[in-house]
Image: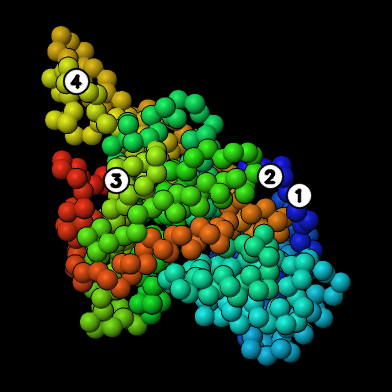
Amino acid sequence: MDNIHNHPTPADALVVFGVTGDLAHKMIFPALYALVKQGTLAVPIVGVAAPQWPLEQLREYAKDSIQQSGQIDDPQALDTLLSVLRYVGGDYNDPETFETLRKTLGEACRPTHYLAIPPSLFATVIKGLSEAGLSDGARVVIEKPFGRDLASALELNRIALSAFPEHSIFRIDHYLGKEAIMNILYFRFANSFLEPIWNRNYVKSVQITLSENFGVKGRGGFYESAGCLRDVIQNHLFQIIALLAMEAPAFQGYSAVHNEKAKVFQAMRPLQAADIVRGQYIGYRQEQGVAEDSDVETFCALRLFIDSWRWEGVPWYVRAGKCLAATAAEVLVELKPPPQKLFDDSAPISGLSNYLRFRLSPNSAVALAARVKHPGKEFIGDLRELFLLEELAGAESPYERLLGDALAGDGALFTREDSVEAAWAVVDPVLTAHDPVHPYEPGSWGPKQADTLLGTGESWHNPVATA
């Protein structure tokens, strides 16, 4: 979405803290390579990390990253990327590291600092930047998780705002950079036929599922400190809810979108223990770094309510998990059935009524389900889907889009302080006050107890990974 009210000045350097880490290797270098190929990245890139690497080692690391992510199809772009790389090795607690960074940046006065580092180091690096005068006129991009509860989010926001103004803080959630997620916003407000029915009068319920058919993949230690609720629901899935539930922005600009999303989080009813079911796949406790008696959830299902004029009384069912039956992400907005049962196969006998389905991954689609009559004298039919969109080739990767936006100063796809804090306030009551995890079989759709969250006659919609 274009912003007609602000015209930010582009950054004149990119600083990547944690440049020798896993995130940089998997996501950031391929994204930077893509930006160079587009011709939208031509500033110095300064990597900062603890190892004392020579610059040539970082260049080899970057090259290996790009090779593993696909192929080097533009050798000139790769040479350009490698030529603008700089490296500063040092301890983040040492002021000398930041002094070296200041010298390495040279005449750059509007750097964008990307914190691709563990959350425990966010405050250290922000303070180091501030004390070295490297936050003046600069931006900071902070990877999720932004806090692990309301108290830590408030504290991290306080530290970030002590060094940077809010408009210069870019809280990154790569999920918001996905083409399919942005299409929700566009589809809702670029079409007039949805608005009359997009409310409590016509919508029966909304389901959102984010499922993965694999486990923690050797990241048991990390998962023990996070769990499913913190890892993907409080951020990724709440962002999707906000796009589905928000009012129309008052003007064309990202601050208007942020205003409406924040109102959704503020209207969410805080969760209680009865609104959440937690599960753990059988075998998780044998993963490396996992406690033998771990109560960390690898599956989480919620029943949410948004106490707003538009959504009062409509249940939002949200679930996510690992080692489930398929890898997919999908939204199902089910509409209420017609008020009279005029036909032999009228709902609710036939299960789902009309619905709108947003498939977000592994490939994206928007589908509308309507009943169509069978040939013959009898008034019976089937629920058929009208496909409105399929995957578009050539879409940017999330990190490519978000890094480009951060360098340009476009905050449309990032999250604002008030939204982060309001989202934590919703889940804060159940982060510690909850029932024990329920075991579930790998390859299933999670523990059966998740069905208890649903209303009478309702069932979970299980996405199909390939359809």
Which part of the image, by quadrant, shows the N terminus? top right
In the rendered image of this protein, does residue 373 appear above or below residue 159? above
Three-letter amino acid code at the position of disc 1: His
Task: Evaluate if marks 2 and 1 touch, with contact meaning CB atoms under 8 Å apart.
Answer: yes
- Residue 277: % across, % down: 23, 61
Give the crowd class for mark 2: few <14, some 14-19, many >=20 residues within 10 Å.
some
Distance between the Cα atoms at labels 3 and 4? 23 Å
Left or right: residue 441 versus residue 185 is left
Secondary structure, mark 1, is loop
Q: How far apart are marks 2 and 1 (CA)?
A: 7 Å
* Residue named by callout 2: 3
Residues at marks 1 and 4, CA–CA distance in whole angstroms: 54 Å
Task: Report the coloring of the rendering.
Answer: rainbow
Residue 270, picture quadrant: bottom left
Q: Which amino acid does label 4 sit on?
A: Gln
Going from the N terminus, do you reach mark 3 or mark 1 first?
1
Using residue 321 as the reference point, say whether residue 346 is left or right of it.
left
Disc 4 and disc 2: Cα gap in Å? 46 Å
Crowd around label 4: few <14 · some 14–19 · many ≥20 (10 Å): few
- Mark 3 belongs to which amino acid? Pro
Which one is earlier in the sequence, the residue at label 3 or at label 2? Answer: 2
Do we see residue 420 in this rendering? yes
Circle 3 residue: 315
